[in-house]
Image (cartoon, grey):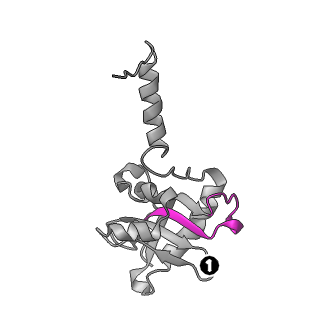
Amino acid sequence: MAHLRVARGWLAPLVTLAGLAAGCGVLGGPPQQAPPGGAFATQLAARVVPAMEAVESDPSMRMVCTAKVFGRDPATASSVRDVRVVYAWVACQQVGGTTNEVIPVAVSLADPPAVRSPRDGEDADYDRIFPPDVRDWARRDPSTLGALAPSMPVPQPT
């Protein structure tokens, strides 16, 4: 009978390494894109917000939104002009309203932009809309997004 030998002192680091590998997508799933940061993330969010605010065409239903970008296509893009699709969590509130809706979206930066979001409870929508390297970000519980909704501008009636 063969026995697995692990030298003393190696088990804890080995277990830790396996846990880190699983969290990075090495085991059990695809690795996730690192969300863009800094000015690049701000520039991408600046493209997402007007696309979301334009979804509602009725002026009496005007929305104010904010976005937290978690990915882009292509994943290697490092400037806005190279990005075809932005993946983001958005929080939107109707002007004069009191509740926020927080949803994951894919915004095509075509002219005009196109917004796609999953229907409630439709797992197949997540698979269709979000590629594997951002899907875990899209499936996150919005409560883990911290200051996204509170960072929204306060909508004023017009």
| Residue 157 placement (x, y as % from top left) | 42, 75
Highlighted range, magenta: 74-92
Q: Name the residue rendered at 48%, 30% in the picture.
A: 17
Helix, strand or loop at disc 1?
Answer: loop
Residue 149 found in image quarter: bottom left
Query: Is 86 inside the magenta-drawn segment?
Result: yes
Assign the C terminus to one quadrant of the image: bottom left
| Numbered marks: total | 1
| Residue 43 placement (x, y as % from top left) | 64, 62
Residue 74 found in image quarter: bottom right
Assign the N terminus to one quadrant of the image: top left
Q: Which residue is mark 1?
A: 110
Q: Name the residue rendered at 38%, 71% in the picture.
A: 125
Residues 11 and 118: in front is: 11
Q: Name the residue rendered at 62%, 70% in the picture.
A: 84
Alpha-carbon neighbours of circle 1 within 10 Å: few (<14), some, or many (≥20)? few
Q: Name the residue rendered at 34%, 71% in the picture.
A: 97
Q: Is 28 placed above or below 87 here?
A: above
Farthest-out residue, left: 121
